Amino acid sequence: MEKKKGRPRNAEAEKAILAAAYDLLLESGFGAVTVEKIAEQAKVSKATIYKWWPNKAAVVMDSFMSAALSRLPVPDTGSVRNDIAIQVTNLAKFLTSREGKVINELIAEGQSDPKLAEEYRSRYFSPRRLESHRILERGVHRGELKQDLDIELTIDLIYGPLFYRLLITGEKLDETFIESLINYAFEGIKAKR
């Protein structure tokens, strides 16, 4: 998030705003969160919020991101297969948690709110995709994966089924599913020896 120019942010007020936005998001969902409610709960003025964020979507996404980042560390075990398995497992656990279910709400709201859709794409999904890209790129460089691997398509191949189950079918994202997904994906992308 590019910060607006002016006086530097007050760290305590920023923390209170992010905590209030996140609490309201979990309690009521994105649609019910307003800048007025955030300001009231954080005990700051609406003007303070608008000075630091361009809109409700931006402050809500910042609050969500600060909570989500600690739950999704990027693995580097020395094995691309293990790293992807860890990342997919962590993501599945997060997406099925109460906090992760917020992603469903944000995606749904983003269908009719282009600002929110841009926020979650640029601030949540693009950074996660870049992390996955780096993991797969390491696997290509180490010779674990095909040299001509289409990394962007591989990301869709691996992570698309998670969101398909999460958003469309409602089927479980359990260990059996994740193991099968990784096995099938790696059959097609691993380097031939």
Image (cartoon, grey):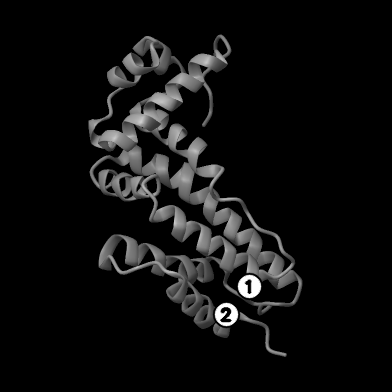
Where on the picture, by quarter, is residue 36?
Answer: top left
* Label 2 sits on residue: 186
Q: CA distance from mark 2 to mark 1?
A: 8 Å
* Label 2 with label 1: CB-CB less than 8 Å: yes
Q: Secondary structure at mark 1?
A: helix
Where on the picture, by quarter, is residue 45?
Answer: top left
Where on the picture, by quarter, is residue 38?
Answer: top left
Rendered location of residue 49, percent (x, y)? 41, 17
Rendered location of residue 81, percent (x, y)? 63, 73
* Label 1 sits on residue: 81
Rendered location of residue 78, percent (x, y)? 74, 67
Q: Hey, what amino acid is under mark 1?
A: Arg
Look at 67% across and 65% down and name the residue there.
Answer: 137
Look at 28% across and 65% down and name the residue there.
Answer: 170
Q: Earlier in the sequence, mark 2 or mark 1?
A: 1
Rendered-image quadrant of the C terminus? bottom right
Look at 53% across and 23% down and name the residue there.
Answer: 3
Is 166 left, or right, of 148 in this rendering? left
- Classify mark 1: residues with Cα within 10 Å, few (<14), some (14-19) or many (20+): many
Look at 53% across and 81% down and name the residue there.
Answer: 183
Q: Hey, what amino acid is under mark 2?
A: Phe
- Classify mark 2: residues with Cα within 10 Å, few (<14), some (14-19) or many (20+): some
Residue 113, labelled with which disc? none
**Residue projecting furthest to the bottom:** 193
Q: Secondary structure at mark 2?
A: helix
Rendered location of residue 4, percent (x, y)? 51, 19
Q: Nearer the viewer, residue 89 or 103?
A: 89
Q: Is residue 157 above or below residue 29?
A: below
